[in-house]
Image (cartoon, helix red, strand yellow):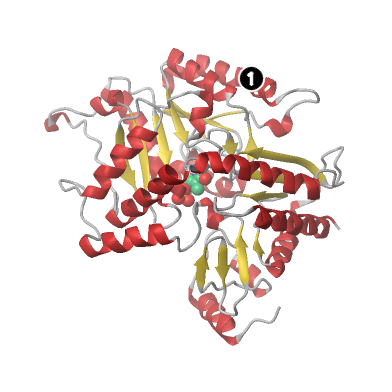
Amino acid sequence: MTRNAANKALADRDLAVVWHPCTQMKDHEQLPMVPIARGEGVWLQDFDGNRYLDAVSSWWVNLFGHANPRINAAIRTQLDSLEHVILAGFTHEPVVQLSERLVRLAPAGLTRCFYADNGSSAVEVAVKMSFHFWLNRGQPAKRRFITLANSYHGETLGALAVGDVGLYKQVYQPLLMDVITVPSPDCYHREAGESWEQHSRRMFEAMEHTLAEHAHEVAAVIIEPLVQCAGNMRMYHPAYLALLREACDRHGVHLIADEIAVGFGRSGTMFACEQAGIRPDFMCLSKGLTGGYLPLSVVLTTDEVYSAFYDDYARLSAFLHSHSYTGNPLACAAALATLDIFASDDVITANRSLAATMREAVEAQLGDHPNVAEIRQTGMILAVEWVKDRRTRECFDWRERRGLRLYQHALSRGALLRPIGNVVYFMPPYVITPGQLGFLAEVAREGIDLACA
Ligand SMILES: *Cc1c(COP(=O)(O)O)cnc(C)c1O
């Protein structure tokens, strides 16, 4: 593909001044930067008129396509009345309405909304609130957190500490609080003949023992319900969540559900916790909250937690946490427009057939591929794990960076597929068509062929 002067000029200016996220910048000595001029629906378009199908929803945030007319209109309207206002001592219509609607949508009993402006900050809020709840209740010893192996909760120091992806965490270990890490229910590791449910139930035994031993010093267990997204899209059965809820209650420990990636229909239900019929003590939301438009996050919690902070000022029991852009009205307006689309278009039902189509398309291309160890799916997330040998599941050496070949092939074919290690996944906007899913599956198959060659 020839890249025109406008593409190249912007890429050059970029590389002179921008330091990109999650990137070894030296890679760009070989790897071309992709400048994007505009987006429309599932498509991103560069300055040369090349289009890329956004199969990863621009890092899992987009739900209803780029430049969605309904969300665009809502932001424009809000812009004409109020762009931003401090949320301490002041309030505004979009944040009140959004809170009312989130409380109605969330598992019953989550009645209070505390806002921040990105996922990691929401995790920080939940972690601090849980610790502070126990402190206000006269139990200062409860200050540790239990987390699952292979989990991911963000990049700020508190969020990094309660996560477990070594690639992001290891370097910063000396800066991080100490957590208790329990084996993951990840069903990729189930034994031959074992069902997802059997495996997830069996893996719960370690959690039960850990809770029994440490509950006196533990504030909360934090989990990503059903899918460990950044941890190679590993998945587990809802039965684990039901067991965990019951055990947290029995041991007097909070449950923090990080639905930042899986919320808003990604898991097949509005919130993943619904599939286990549970209500966490804290539910963190971000990413899809604004339809992928603007940074916003929220922690929903219970009256019980809220009331533990509610007292005369002099008792100093308030939650004195804030971010400058907390509850930004433009972001709230985008979120309200996103919830309007869920309400009017019966999105969850429509996604069920879209998810089935996605599965069929990928099975047709990769179902019996000699390098594919597993095709797994939870709702609108589908992942393909490729290996050196299907039977032994032996992996290629990570230093060979075979995923990059797939990534570059996909770009050349007009698709944005961004593998995590040796896993290629589809997490597309919900406005994708069956034909486009077929195209992505074909590109993924070609990419895996190249990566494994
Ligand atoms: C992306 C993500 C976060 C962090 O959100 P940021 O907005 O990137 O800080 C936290 N938890 C999960 C499960 C995520 O996928």
Residue 127 rendering spot, x and y as whole percentages: 39, 35
Residue at 48% x, 35% y: name it: 271
Vertical comparison of 368 with 37: above or below: above
- Tell me if I can see residue 416 in this picture: yes
For residue 387, side relative to residue 327 (left or right): right
For residue 375, side relative to residue 287 (left or right): right
Residue type, numbered disc 1? Arg
Residue at 54% x, 39% y: name it: 349
Q: Quadrant of residue 198?
A: top right
Q: Quadrant of residue 351?
A: top right
Q: How many marks?
A: 1
- The quadrant in which the N terminus is found is bottom right
For residue 370, side relative to residue 172 (left or right): right
Residue at 24% x, 25% y: name it: 307
Nearer to the camera, 326 or 351 = 351
For residue 368, side relative to residue 345 (left or right): right
Read off the residue under disc 1. 201
Residue 41 rendering spot, x and y as whole percentages: 53, 61
Residue at 29% x, 38% y: name it: 100
- Tell me if I can see residue 385 in this picture: no
Nearer to the camera, 87 or 333 = 333
Q: Circle 1: is it few (<14), some (14-19), or many (20+) Cα within 10 Å?
A: some
Residue 30 rendering spot, x and y as whole percentages: 69, 73
Residue 117 rendering spot, x and y as whole percentages: 36, 51
Name the secondary structure under disc 1: helix
Vertical comparison of 365 with 253: above or below: below
Q: Quadrant of residue 79?
A: bottom left
- The quadrant in which the C terminus is found is bottom right
